[in-house]
Structure formats: structure tokens, C-alpha cells
Image: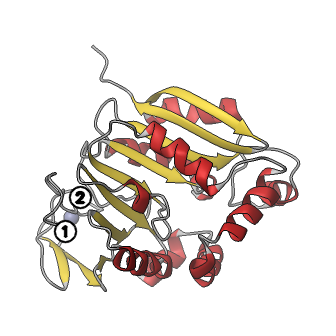
Amino acid sequence: MTETTSIKPIGFACPKCKRPLQPGEKALRCSECHLTYPIVGGIPDFLSEGQLASVAPNYRWIKMLEFLAPIYEGRLWHSFILKTLAGAGHSSLHSIASFISETMEGVTGSVLDVACGPATYGRRMASPSRNVYGVDFSMGTLQQGMTHIAREGITGVRLARARVEELPFENAVFDGVICGGSLHLFPDTVLALHEIARTMKAGAPLAVTTFVAGNAPLTRLMRRRKNMHVFQIPDLQQYLTEAGFEGFGPKLDGTFLTFSARKAMPSK
Ligand SMILES: [Zn+2]
């Protein structure tokens, strides 16, 4: 982590037992589980390829995303995705970034970017008072993110390969979480949200962009795919409550949905 940020960096924890890991130059070790997690090109890797294939039903899509990583952030690509998935909405990379910034306004400390891709939004969130931790299960897109980070001279962003169901962090360490365009890809939405909530401090905000059921061609196609969810807003609200969130604030643009929520405060 950089010296220019004023916040105390948080260390990675074992994704299995959630205990802090012993740092090393080439690997992180869990003395409890006797597991070693390699660091590849500056990216701690909490997943093996074999594990990835067995746990990720959307593995084929991940591989496609790795192929697409270099053009992932291009304006045309984004507008293509938003138009075909969301119908004739007006959302753009800029408006999504604005929504995320507004939700995270005033948040200092550590922010988690779940399924961060090349840290498209996470890189824009880092500041001297805010460190960003990005996790994704595609090593290719994470490496692309590292290239952007180096080229843009961004400090305060750390990336790791991990799955959302087993985040490599201790309980209640994050002051905010963002999850852009991936919630519908997680096999078990409540399990994923539950694990995200575990890593958040009480009252911390969550900013999500995803899709809901509609008639745009790709959402019709997604609905036929077993491993992708096309949400209904009331169901989503129910999932969030089950996972320990409150203050659901949805905003629809076509079938493109942005929403914010907060990690529920402990009941008195
Ligand atoms: Zn462990």
C-alpha cells in the first residue's frame, strides 16, 4: 500500500477461516489452515484454476471477459452493453460513476470493489483519505487493472483474486462497498450479499448496478440462462433484508438498475 495515503491499510485475511494472514513477498500464509496463497504479479491469488472451474458456473463467461478486458472500459463497449442489456436507457459510464460517487460521498477509510474487473470504478474512488480493495475471479482483468493503475499513477488501490462467497477479509473492516454490473452473475445472491455484509461496518453504504427483468434482447436471453439472475425489484429487496441490509434505494433506467443500501445497525 502507498505511503501517500493517510489511512491505515487493512491486511488480507484467509478466505476460509477469516484470520489475518502472514505476509510474505511471494505468498500469504494461513497458520491456522496451513494454506499458502501465492502473489502473482502483485495480485494475491485466493483461487486456483481447478477451484475456479468447479465453483464458477459462469467460468466460460469469465474467460470471454478476460479476452474482452482491454476494451472493457471503452465508451462504445459500455454503451453497447447498456443499450442491449438495459434497453433504450440513458445510463452511461459517467452516470454510473456519478451514482457510485454520490453513494460513497463522505466515506473515508477502506472501500471494497466486488467483482471489480479492471477496477473500472474502484480506480476512480481511490483518494488520499480512501483506500480501495478490488476483488474479482478473473486474473486477466485484474492484470489489466494493474496496468491501468500503474499507467495512471494511482495509489491506494489493491487487487486480489477471490470469489465473492469467500472474501479474503476480516469481519467489519469496510466503510463502503461497490459492486458494478455483477450481482446478477453470482450463483447464490443471498449468500454473496451475506458475505459482502460480513466484511462491512454497521451503517456502511453499498452501491450496486445490475439488471432487472425487461424486454431488452439480452435480458430475455439472460432469463433463459440458468446461471444468471434477472431480478424483480421486490425479490431483490427481500434478498438484501435477508443478508443484513436496510434502506434499499432503487433507481431504474430501462432495465438497468442502480441501488444503494446500508449494512443494518445491530438491533438494540
Ligand atoms: Zn485459514
Q: How many numbered tags mark residues here?
A: 2
Residue 1, horizontal then vertical, whole percent: 19, 67
Query: Of residues 83 and 263, which is closer to you in this image?
Result: 83
Residue in view at x 54 percent, y 28 percent: 248
Whether the residue under disc 1 has CB within 8 Å of ligand 1: yes
* Marker disc for residue 156: none
Callout 1: helix, strand or loop? Answer: loop
Relative to residue 40, is residue 90 drawn left or right?
A: right
CB under 8 Å between discs 2 and 1: yes
> Which image quadrant is residue 128 in?
bottom left
Residue in view at x 18 percent, y 61 percent: 11
The residue at which mark 2 appears reads as 17
Residue in view at x 18 percent, y 67 percent: 2
The residue at which mark 1 appears reads as 33
Please say whether residue 192 is visible from this viewpoint: yes
Residue 22, horizontal then vertical, whole percent: 11, 70
